[in-house]
Image (cartoon, grey):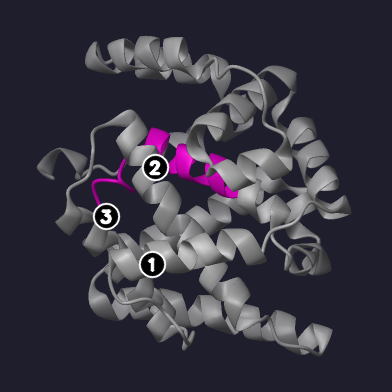
Amino acid sequence: MRKIWGRADTVLFIFAGAAAEFALNKAVDWLYFTGKLPADPLGRLFGTVGYARQIIFSEKEKAYAAIDKMSKIHSAVESSRGMAIPDWAYRDVLFMLIHYSVAAFEMLERKLTSSEKEEIVEVFCTVGQRMKIPGLPVGYNEWKAMHGRHLENDLRKSQYTTDLYKQYRRSLGNLRYLVLIEVQKRLVPPGVKRLLQLNGIPLLSPALFLYKICRTLKMEWLLKSLLLPPAYIKQIRGLDYKGNDAF
């Protein structure tokens, strides 16, 4: 998990994929209740990444404290709205983080082993258990079956989907938005691709090949600086875990 979440490019790809499923989730209205995601998608991204990294890179007690703080924030939103976030919506978020952790790493690095996939499921389910989310899977195979059912039952295209994609384009600009779409074409499951009509021939493969060459030559930040919003370069650099070489 620290290997996956210790590189900025992998983390960005994880959230590029998750941005697609967030826009389709039947509980996406909760994101509009606070207004934070549609108002500032990139700011919301870095806030979420901050909590995830606290959990993954901290010792056990500090990780639990970060999870508990996150739970309190959700409880406060529920109290303000006068209703509870559905259990299935919490599971959906965990499931998409599992899926895109696997998919992004395998696209950028290598195939994961069975034991590594089991570890990813175990870590996110430990987070879910601390948050008292019921009905969590035991092991990768059970997660895969449950994730398939989630994709069938919990996603739909709505007015929120259309609006969120407008906000993504507004925040990223046209060129970076096109890069987002190409990344999503490679990462999202077929059902998500169909609902979002992510049609056409994926154009990301040549760019990935170039990026991997740049990374080998330690020049990947030259390419990143052209593709990433200048206002967020500092935060994106901070996503590279300094202890990454030890993994």
Give the answer, above or below, for where 97 lies relative to 105.
below
Q: Which residues are magenta?
A: 1-19
Query: Going 74% across and 65% down the picture, which residue do you hit?
Result: 26
* Nearer to me, 142 or 90: 142
Q: Percent position (x, y) of residue 80?
A: 80, 85
Nearer the N terminus, badge 2 or badge 1?
2
Residue tagged 3: 1
Kindly report the distance in space between the C-alpha atoms of the residues bearing marks 2 and 1.
15 Å
What is the crowding at mark 1: few (fewer than 14 residues within 10 Å), some, or many (at least 20)? some
Nearer the N terminus, badge 3 or badge 1?
3
* Amino acid at dot 1: Trp
Residue tagged 2: 103
Compared across the picture, whether 246 is left or right of 56 comes to left
Q: Secondary structure at mark 1?
A: helix
* Nearer to me, 83 or 49: 83
Kindly report the distance in space between the C-alpha atoms of the residues bearing marks 2 and 3.
13 Å
Q: Percent position (x, y) of residue 104?
A: 39, 39
Give the answer, above or below, for where 87 lies relative to 214.
below
